[in-house]
Image: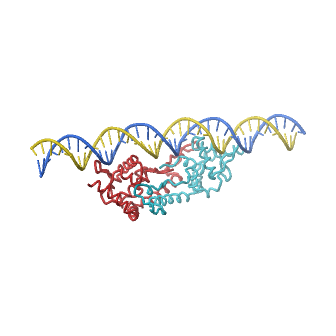
Chain colours: A cyan, B red, C blue, D yellow
DNA sequence: GATATCGTACTCGGATATACATTGTCCGAGTGGTGACGG
DNA sequence: CCGTCACCACTCGGACAATGTATATCCGAGTACGATATC
């Protein structure tokens, strides 16, 4: 059970976007280059974020992706849901209802204990992810930002605005 | 991010084993037949459980699988770990250390915030799974056991013991 | 009748195909900027 | 000098291959049971 690496890619990309001035975005190329990632594949993942409404896309020259909401209102769970899909990892197919000794009148209204336990566990996981917002992490990144990094970002942005 | 269906198969199988008299086991064939599952594939998953030390295997006629510990001492996490492997779903590859504007002297002693957040979330998930033992679920199953089901199990076991 | 031995049936274990999902790449669609042209 | 128009470069979006992992199956290795022959 492993998560798509796209989650890590887009999470870092979103943190970067969150550190930018409000309303300003960057093209997928720049987001990929910033962490030395494959541009085309990064673009694909950003599309998923756009479909999910986490980011907004602006086409044409000077376009790119920018956050659709305030960083405080975007959680890690939003990103996971956009990339991985919101379906639970444990998919109960009700095998308890199969086999030679299943009574037709067996009451299966309540989910089986195994299913219930996994649902509780994934809920705890989801709640933890929902409690972490981009704003929290962007602050950490901004604190460590070097002049070098600021310069590159400014160049990208001003290059856009020029 | 989806979990192997083998987890569901083996979880139900282990609950069944937990409901049996202490020390008694069943062959993989019987475990599969009980829930109308592919016997060969069930056998493969039971092997993983045996390697992980969750169940013990007994070869030869009258052999099979039996729990290696008391049901109270086997948790859902043990089964997930045996089937899926204990590695975290989110694999941080430290992409923050890549790219054009990474300072060589940047301190990366502490894990990045994204990595830390996912680690916390998965920990919550793991703790929840560790808190559920086979004994809890076996009791639920035994309470609902029909005479039909009891008869089939007795037949399998006595067929073994005869 | 008891015991040792051989054969057989049963079960696990790992090696081997297959299907599917993820990963990775490319080209077309759409849009804003820019320069040229005309008024 | 200003406004309009057409062209171009840039960016997103979805369609298309390559790779890796999970799924599914089969056959060989090993063991206990039982039958048989012998003492």
Q: Is residue B127 above or below residue B60?
A: below
Residue found at the far bottom of this picture: B143
Q: Nearer the viewer, residue A125 or B105?
A: A125
Q: Nearer the viewer, residue B129 or A95?
A: A95
Q: State the image coordinates of residue A98 (x, y, percent, origin top left).
A: 44, 55
Residue B127 seen in this snapshot: no
Side of A88 relative to B34 (left or right): right
**Residue at 39% of width from left, 65% of height from top?**
B143
The quadrant the C terminus of chain B occupies is: bottom left
Q: Quadrant of residue B67?
A: bottom left
Q: State the image coordinates of residue B127 (x, y, percent, origin top left).
A: 44, 59
Q: Is residue A47 above or below residue C16?
A: below
Q: Quadrant of residue D7?
A: top right
Q: Quadrant of residue B153?
A: bottom left
Side of B161 relative to B17 (left or right): left
Q: Nearer the viewer, residue B53 or A67?
A: B53
**Residue at 59% of width from left, 46% of height from top?**
A45
Residue B10 seen in this snapshot: yes
Q: State the image coordinates of residue B9 (x, y, percent, origin top left).
A: 42, 53
Side of B131 relative to A134 (left or right): left
Side of A13 relative to A159 (left or right): left
Q: Nearer the viewer, residue B157 or B53?
A: B157
**Residue at 57% of width from left, 42% of height from top?**
A37
Q: State the image coordinates of residue B10 (x, y, percent, origin top left).
A: 40, 53
Count how many numbered circles sit on residues in the image.
0
């Amino acid at each position: 059970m492993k998560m798509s690496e796209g989650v890590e890619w887009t999470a870092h990309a979103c943190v970067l976007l969150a550190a930018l001035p409000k309303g300003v975005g960057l093209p997928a190329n720049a987001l990929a280059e910033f962490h030395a990632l494959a541009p085309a594949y990064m673009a694909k993942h950003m599309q998923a974020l756009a479909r999910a409404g986490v980011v907004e896309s602006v086409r044409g020259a000077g376009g790119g992706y920018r956050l659709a909401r305030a960083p405080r209102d975007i959680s890690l769970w939003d990103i996971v849901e956009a990339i991985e899909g919101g379906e639970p990892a444990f998919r109960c197919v009700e095998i308890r209802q199969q086999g030679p000794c299943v009574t037709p009148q067996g009451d299966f209204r309540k989910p089986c204990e195994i299913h219930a336990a996994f649902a509780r566990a994934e809920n705890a996981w989801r709640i933890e992810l929902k409690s972490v917002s981009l704003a929290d992490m962007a602050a950490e990144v901004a604190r460590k930002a070097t002049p070098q990094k600021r310069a590159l970002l400014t160049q990208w942005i001003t290059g856009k605005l020029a």
